[in-house]
Image (cartoon, rainbow, N blue to C red):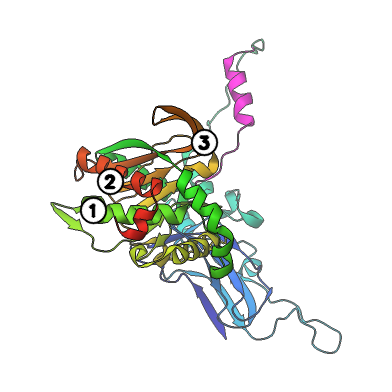
Amino acid sequence: MTLNITVPELGESVTEATVAKWFKAPGDAVALDEPLVELETDKIALEINAASAGVLADILVPEGEDVEVGAVLGHLAEGESPKANDGNGAAEPAPVSKATQDDALPLSPAVRKLVEDNDLDPSAISGSGKDGRILKGDVLKLLQAPAPQAHAVEVPAEPAIVSAEVDELTEVADEERVPMSRLRQRVAERLKMAQDTAAILTTFNEVDMSQVMAARRKYRDAFEKKHGVRLGFMSFFVKAAVAALKEIPSVNAEIDGTDIVYKKYYHIGVAVSAPQGLVVPVLRDADKLGFAGIEKNIAALGAKARDGKLSMADLSGGTFTISNGGVFGSLMSTPILNPPQSGILGMNKIQERPIAIGGQMEIRPMMYLALSYDHRLIDGREAVTFLVRIKECIEEPERLLLDL
């Protein structure tokens, strides 16, 4: 029996994906639940596993091609692999794939449509995909190429001239052109949309990290021993952000048409740099979590991000975002909104600086904070007050315990 390998439902508002990688080739043995192919959407990468043990019969959509939900990617033949030994010391030959039967590699639906619409001969198209497969870009390149001249015209030879054109060609030869991943395309679209639709302003402040660092040093070992997770700075900032959001609810709101939607829950997005690009997994109901709960959830989400195993649920529903550019050495940066949210807090590098304390100069570990906000919804007074509340909670962490 042959099973279709199809594109599953990808989540709310996601209808298309890109075939990122095939883990098997036609004729390869496949175990139950073994990964067959990886798809990349505009939010996450996900693997499609084998619904049965058997053999990968064929691949209909090569790597790099776009597919819609429900599209057939290939076929899986149930049963023992023909490459397996039959017990008499001889292995049966692998089944002949569609590509071998037709003496041509199969075309994906998108490529086939382009070829048929433009009445092209597939054999005349040079494929740049895996095993010489024809990709959509190969067809487009052929269509955009200038038509050949009907007659050759003899042109008198001219002396070679070293010009800027030669330099330009040399530079192009040293370049590498690769397609943007769907995730990177979506990130670019969302960032541009944020700039085009929101009136983004940023207010800055600085915070003395002395008290938080002292508390972390004092309780770090006991905290890790009891809860099995390290005590980091992010839990302090998440708790401080929740306290500030409760006081200034407009920062936790969003604009929907001509309405303002005030959120009575606190789902804090934590920006993470994953191998596939920037992702913002969401820490749900952060107001109901203690320091240990926050640290455990952040660690779990970070591990899923690094392994490419974040789900759509992990990435949706955030009401406010915290981004920590300081882990990369940023001293001061301006974060950009994560639509439809109205605010984002930017943390930066902790750096010792001379600070005037009570008329005396002292060296303190300082961090610049930045709050970018949508001025359509949040006034300057509210933005500044919000950031001051976070500063107060970090400089006097006992406020978080006493709900002040």
Secondary structure of the residue carrying numbered label 3:
strand
In primary-sequence order, the first of circles 3 and 1 is 1
**CA neighbours of label 1 inside 10 A, class few (<14), some (14 to 19), many (20+):** some
- Tell me the residue at 60%/13% (across/down): 163
* Circles 2 and 3 in contact, beta carbons < 8 Å: no
Residue closer to the observer: 109 or 159: 109
- Residues at discs 1 and 2 in contact (Cβ within 8 Å): yes
| Rendered-image quadrant of the N terminus | bottom right
Q: Position of residue 87 (x, y in %)?
A: 82, 89
Crowding near the residue tagged with mark 2, few <14, some 14–19, many ≥20 C-alpha atoms within 10 Å = many
- How far apart are the alpha carbons under marks 1 and 2? 8 Å
**Residue at position x 63%, y 83% from top?**
53
Can residue 59 be seen in the rendering of this structure? Answer: no
Image position of 192 (left or right of 89): left
Residue 23 left/right relative to 196: right
Give the amino acid type for the residue marked by disc 1 in the picture: Glu
Dot 3 alpha-carbon crowd within 10 angstroms: few under 14, some 14 to 19, many 20 or more: some
Q: Disc 2 residue type?
A: Phe
Which quadrant, please, contains the C terminus? bottom left
**Disc 1 designates what residue?**
247
Q: CA distance from mark 3 to mark 1?
A: 29 Å
Query: What residue is pinned by disc 2?
Result: 386
Mark 3, residue position: 351
Real-space CA distance between mark 2 and mark 3, rounded to the nearest whole angstrom: 23 Å
In this rendering, position of residue 87 left or right of residue 154: right
Secondary structure beneath disc 1?
Answer: helix
